[in-house]
């Protein structure tokens, strides 16, 4: 690699000697004392000997307790498993965003006289539950 190529790379890769700081460079002393590495260390560019690569450090040490945190009273009831992933709050969010998107689309695209958008009515949680049920049922038999 020539000197001109290296100077071009300096424009794209951060240097450890630069005086520029970003929001990512600022860390508190408390954060630094909790672990052996910091974000500054991760952003420092160094040349690697490709023939003798060091072992990578662990990315994120996991310290949580794995496993499900809900009690499932009847394991034979698939609806209870469905409700673990699609609770009322998520379905309400889907309803809100679906209605918002439909309003935006209808306001931007004035359809023809017999367009399906002329018959749009806001959806609700019951319709979304039915849609998700049909979708899961359909996927069960096509997979």
Image: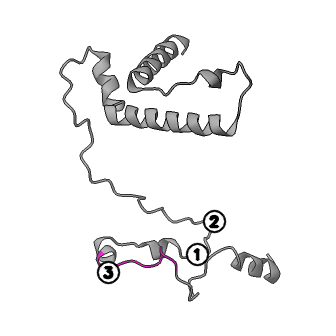
Quadrant occupied by the C terminus? top right
Give percent across and percent down for residue 22: 52, 78
Q: Earlier in the sequence, mark 2 or mark 1?
A: 1
Q: Residue at x 22, y 37 (%)?
A: 69
- The crowd level at tag 2 (other Cα within 10 Å; few <14, some 14-19, many 20+) is few
Give the answer, above or below, for where 139 lies relative to 10: above
Picture coordinates of residue 94 (x, y %)? 45, 34
Q: Please give left or right for residue 54 compared with residue 71 in the image.
A: right
User: Which disc, if any, is residue 45?
Assistant: 1
Please give the range of residues in magenta: 22-30
Single out the mark in the foreground, 2 or 3. Answer: 3
Residue shown at 61% from the left, 77% from the top: 14
Tag 1's secondary structure? loop
Colour mode? one colour
Few, some or many residues within 10 Å of mark 3 (<14, 14–19, 20+): few
Q: Where is residue 9 shown, x and y percent of the image?
A: 72, 75
């Amino acid at each position: 690699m020539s000197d001109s190529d290296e100077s071009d790379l300096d424009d794209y890769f951060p240097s450890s000697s630069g005086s520029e700081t970003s929001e990512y460079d600022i860390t508190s002393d408390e954060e630094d004392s909790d672990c052996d590495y910091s974000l500054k260390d991760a952003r420092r560019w160094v040349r690697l000997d490709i023939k003798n690569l060091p072992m990578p450090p662990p990315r994120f040490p996991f310290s949580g307790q794995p496993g499900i945190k809900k009690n499932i009273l009847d394991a034979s009831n698939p609806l209870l498993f469905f409700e673990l992933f699609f609770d009322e709050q998520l379905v309400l969010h889907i309803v809100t965003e679906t209605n918002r998107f439909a309003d935006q689309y209808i306001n931007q695209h004035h359809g023809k006289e017999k367009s399906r958008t002329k018959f749009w009515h806001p959806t609700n949680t019951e319709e979304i539950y039915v849609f998700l049920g049909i979708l899961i049922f359909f996927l069960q038999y096509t997979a």
